[in-house]
């Protein structure tokens, strides 16, 4: 394999010292300093976006296969209209009863398990995951959290501790136990193969025993239900069930992080966890909820939330504001009215078929994983996962007018997650562009 384990923000990142900086890039670096994160060897200055396309200042259009935030399409007119109308009427904090907020919460809860009857709105997935861990600790009286070894769950102090892919140096704290991403192993994809689920469940049981031995116990097993930062692991259906059972047997809760796979992206189900036949104790969500408007949420059982609130109150000034609720409700309506969940499955199947054809012609393409419009494609060299080749493909696609990112422990997995409105023609455009990049050699 080429290179070692990669930190999540290093994947596809612009290197400020590698080339001369344009005035806009120099301005950004001067303003944000060391916290600045830009993509590509040559960062792009964007000025507009619509559907699955983004437009740069120089007029060039790019097909967006990376950005899962505007999930129903960039600048969707229904979301724009809902936000515009609401902000012209009322936008205030959450201390008032505002019908549009509860209308949205009722519509969102209709998509969730009935047991998760309380929804706390936040502004980011980081806040939602932070709150979820605190609730789990209050309910269980334990402290330990189990996550995958390349997980990313946010950037508050608490969730950075359970986001090993965010750490540039050092290790996770003692109260965090890491498990490897699900092991597809021999026989994967055979149809009756349940090996990955059982193996992953055994890893979670081992981690739970380790936390007990360290004196922390298990408060929660926290998992992104498509393991996006680990390299995208969606199969087989039911993959999560033994792991959830193992965590609960150790006294912990299951927190389903749906920030990336939720809201119809997998096509097979509205939530990633549904495909695995499990009911979470807590669900967190974010990014695609408002199609770019900052909003997120944690859904929990009323008794669990009450256990937390007995000792610690919770209030979020902007979480659940009326404009966020209007945006979120519009997203739910668009997903339903435009059949975007079904489209994700159809477009994803077309993508997978095209990737299989490319794999026959190009040895650099390894395993392809995922479901719907959330796919991972391993890039391999003679020695194994090839992060260098992955970076060259990403920048080659940029030159072809296609935006894409990377994931996985080694940064050697192409992460495919375009807007759910993706058309068949746009699928073919991507496949053609990838074919041209591969034909040039990487």
Image (cartoon, rainbow, N blue to C red):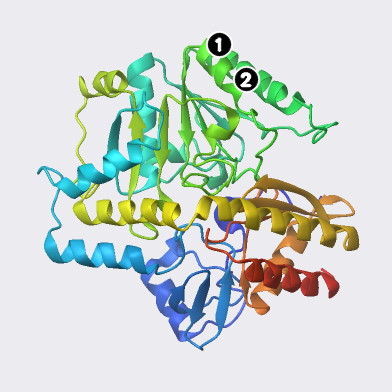
Q: Quadrant of residue 16?
A: bottom right
Circle on res. 382: none
Viewer-nearest of discs 2 and 1? 2
Does 425 sit above or below residue 405?
Answer: below
Q: Where is residue 245 in the image (x, y as percent from the top left)?
A: 56, 16
Say above or below: 424 vs 143.
Answer: below
In this view, the residue farthest toward the bottom is 58
Position of residue 132 relative to residue 210, above or below, is: below
In the rendered structure, the answer to whether residue 181 lies left or right of residue 103 reads right
Q: Give the side of residue 99 with respect to residue 29, left or right.
A: left
Q: Provide residue 44's location: percent of width, then percent of height.
A: 52, 77
On screen, residue 199 above or below 422: above
Q: Earlier in the sequence, mark 2 or mark 1?
A: 1
Q: Is mark 2 on a helix, strand or loop?
A: helix
Q: In which quarter of the image is the C terminus?
A: bottom right
Q: Taking the image as drawn, is residue 409 in sight?
A: no
Q: How far apart are marks 2 and 1 (CA)?
A: 21 Å
Name the residue at the left extreme. 96
Question: Which quarter of the picture shows residue 149?
Answer: top right
Q: How many labels does the image show?
A: 2
Of residues 155 and 129, which is closer to you in this image? 129
Decide if residue 355 is in sight here.
yes
Q: Where is residue 383 in the image (x, y as percent from the top left)?
A: 87, 51
Residue with the mark numbered 2: 242
| Disc 2 and disc 1 in contact, CB within 8 angstroms | no
Image point (49%, 80%), residue name: 55
Number of residues whose C-alpha sits closer than 10 Å to that of mark 1, classed few (under 14), some (14–19) or many (20 or more): few
Left or right: 434 in relation to 315: right
> Pointer 1: what residue?
213
């Amino acid at each position: 394999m080429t290179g070692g384990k990669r930190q999540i923000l290093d994947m596809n990142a612009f290197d400020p010292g590698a080339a001369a900086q344009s005035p806009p890039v120099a301005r950004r670096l001067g303003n944000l300093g060391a916290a600045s994160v830009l993509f590509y060897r040559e960062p792009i200055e964007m000025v507009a976006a619509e559907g699955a396309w983004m437009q740069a200042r120089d007029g060039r259009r790019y097909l967006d296969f990376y950005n899962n935030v505007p999930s129903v399409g960039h600048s969707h007119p229904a979301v724009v209209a809902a936000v515009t109308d609401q902000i012209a009427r009322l936008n205030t904090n959450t201390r008032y009863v505002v019908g549009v907020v509860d209308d949205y919460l009722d519509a969102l809860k209709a998509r969730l398990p009935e047991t998760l009857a309380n929804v706390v709105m936040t502004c980011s997935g980081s806040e939602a995951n932070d709150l979820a861990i605190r609730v789990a600790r209050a309910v269980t009286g334990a402290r330990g959290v189990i996550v995958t070894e390349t997980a990313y769950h946010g950037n508050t102090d608490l969730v950075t501790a359970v986001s090993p892919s965010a750490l540039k140096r050092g290790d996770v704290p003692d109260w965090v136990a890491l498990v490897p991403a699900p092991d597809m192993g021999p026989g994967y994809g055979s149809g009756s193969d349940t090996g990955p689920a059982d193996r992953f469940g055994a890893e979670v049981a081992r981690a739970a025993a380790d936390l007990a031995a360290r004196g922390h116990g298990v408060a929660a097993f926290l998992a992104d239900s498509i393991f996006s930062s680990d390299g995208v692991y969606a199969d087989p259906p039911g993959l999560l069930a033994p792991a959830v059972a193992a965590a609960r047997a150790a006294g912990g809760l299951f927190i389903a992080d749906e920030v990336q796979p939720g809201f119809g992206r997998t096509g097979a189900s509205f939530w990633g966890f549904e495909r695995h036949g499990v009911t979470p104790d807590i669900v967190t969500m974010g990014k695609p909820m408002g199609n770019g408007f900052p909003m997120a949420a944690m859904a929990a059982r009323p008794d669990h939330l009450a256990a937390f609130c007995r000792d610690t109150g919770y209030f979020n000034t902007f979480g659940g504001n009326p404009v966020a609720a209007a945006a979120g409700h519009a997203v739910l309506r668009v997903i339903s009215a435009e059949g975007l969940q079904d489209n994700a499955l159809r477009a994803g199947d077309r993508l997978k078929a095209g990737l299989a054809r490319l794999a026959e012609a190009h040895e650099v393409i390894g395993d392809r994983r995922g479901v719907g419009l959330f796919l991972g494609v391993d890039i391999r060299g003679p020695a194994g996962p090839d992060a260098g080749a992955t970076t060259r493909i990403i920048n080659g696609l940029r030159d072809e007018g296609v935006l894409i990112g990377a994931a996985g422990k080694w940064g050697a997995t192409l992460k495919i997650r375009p807007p759910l409105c993706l058309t068949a023609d746009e699928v073919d455009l991507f496949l053609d562009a990838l074919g041209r990049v591969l034909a040039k050699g990487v």
